[in-house]
Image (cartoon, helix red, strand yellow):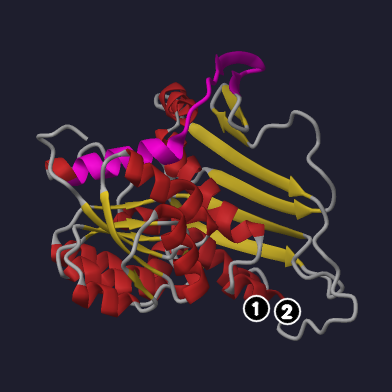
């Protein structure tokens, strides 16, 4: 941090492994002042505090907000644990960095979005791949194309079997705890499709294949209609390893298609048009956000909290669709509930 740049006082809410591997060391590197840590688990907050030499520690988010003078709250707690801490911070004028997914409840996420607007604070959701040059290049290549269909696929190995343990609550339990890949990666995939195509989801439908002998669903499919009428399909399969060299994303447009192969390359109509170099989007997003707070200018932020709702809502609508036998859900109406 340059001597003329103001210090940014940050509180970390949620000190699990992800915060310790990414945000905390990044913020230290960027010259932000991490003044306190908070986690409901005392062991987690003490482990992070000891690792990074941060003495002020809390196990209650509201107590932290009441006792500390913060510029920024980094909310890194699991989606199911989000309540009103983020909303309280925003209403007090504290800028908000939110890990994704933002919540398992549309109502809670919308209340936080309202508080961000009311408090007039800067905000972002950790859709870090928007900052990766690979996805920015895909967006540029598609900007003048008329999208017809998009697909995303996420294959993986079998989950653990239940064996002698009682499952009791079925797939709804695992969704509530964000235990299925289709929640975390579903929100990611929706956001990156939105970012690359410029389209928002209007309707959502979902089905799960969830045998009782496994701890998580073996497959799920999310089907979407964009606001233009174009379609999309996201599939998540837990059966075996990933087939070799298949793209994550394939986006069909009138007269051609574009494929994104993991974080490696882009092909257009079967020809390689972009090969990625090593890049850390987590660090870049942290840098952009802290710089925005210092300058009081959010123009470089690529995803604010309100925009993040447009990536969260289709996935939560898919949960409801699956629980209702695959009923089609109107996403804008669902968002307002």
Residue 85 position, x and y percent, is: 31, 74
Q: Residue furthest right?
A: 163
Say whether residue 277 is left or right of residue 69: right
Q: Which residue is mark 1?
A: 173
Image disc number at residue 15 = none
Residue 195 visible in the picture: no
Give the residue drawn at x 40%, y 50%. Answer: 24
Asked whether 230 falls inside the magenta stretch, the response is no
Asked whether 280 falls inside the magenta stretch, the response is yes
- If the image is split into quadrants, where does the N terminus sit? top left
Bounds of the magenta span? 265-293
Mark 2–mark 1 distance (CA, rounded to whole Å)? 6 Å
Residue 179 position, x and y percent, is: 64, 66
Question: How would you rate the neighbour count of disc 2 (Cα within 10 Å): few for under 14, some for 14-19, many for 20 or more?
Answer: some
Residue 278 position, x and y percent, is: 53, 24
Q: Quadrant of residue 161?
A: bottom right
Q: Quadrant of residue 273?
A: top right
- Secondary structure, mark 2, is helix
Please report contact status of discs 2 and 1: CB closer than 8 Å, yes or no: yes
Image disc number at residue 170 = 2
Q: Residue furthest left?
A: 4
Instruction: Return the residue nearer the eye: 120 or 311.
Output: 120
Residue 121 visible in the picture: yes
Question: How would you rate the neighbour count of disc 1 (Cα within 10 Å): few for under 14, some for 14-19, many for 20 or more?
Answer: some
């Amino acid at each position: 941090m340059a001597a003329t740049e103001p210090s940014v006082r940050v509180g970390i809410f949620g000190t699990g492994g992800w915060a310790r591997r990414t945000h905390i060391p990044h913020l230290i590197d960027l010259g932000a002042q991490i003044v306190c840590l908070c986690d409901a688990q005392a062991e987690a907050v003490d482990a992070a505090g000891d690792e990074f030499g941060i003495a002020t520690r809390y196990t209650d988010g509201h107590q932290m907000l009441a006792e500390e003078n913060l510029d920024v709250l980094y909310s890194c707690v699991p989606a199911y644990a989000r309540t009103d801490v983020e909303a309280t911070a925003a209403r007090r004028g504290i800028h908000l960095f939110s890990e994704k997914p933002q919540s398992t409840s549309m109502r809670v996420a919308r209340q936080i979005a309202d508080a961000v607007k009311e408090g007039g604070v800067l905000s972002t959701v950790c859709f870090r791949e928007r900052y990766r040059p690979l996805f920015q290049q895909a967006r540029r290549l598609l900007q003048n194309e008329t999208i017809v269909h998009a697909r995303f696929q996420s294959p993986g190995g079998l989950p653990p079997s239940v064996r002698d343990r009682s499952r009791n609550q079925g797939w709804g339990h695992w969704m509530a705890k964000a235990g299925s890949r289709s929640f975390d990666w579903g929100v990611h995939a929706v956001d990156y499709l939105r970012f690359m195509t410029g389209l928002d989801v209007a309707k959502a439908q979902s089905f799960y294949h969830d045998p009782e002998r496994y701890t998580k669903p073996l497959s799920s499919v999310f089907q979407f209609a964009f606001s233009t009428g174009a379609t999309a399909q996201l599939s998540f399969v837990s059966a075996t390893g990933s087939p070799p060299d298949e793209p994550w994303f394939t986006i069909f447009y009138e007269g051609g298609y574009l494929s994104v192969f993991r974080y490696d390359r882009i092909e257009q109509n079967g020809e390689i048009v972009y090969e990625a170099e090593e890049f850390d989007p987590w660090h870049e997003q942290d840098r952009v956000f802290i710089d925005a707070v210092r300058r009081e200018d959010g123009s470089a932020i690529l995803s604010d909290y309100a925009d993040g709702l447009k990536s969260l809502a289709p996935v939560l609508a898919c949960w409801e669709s699956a629980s209702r036998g695959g009923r089609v859900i109107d996403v804008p109406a669902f968002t307002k509930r």
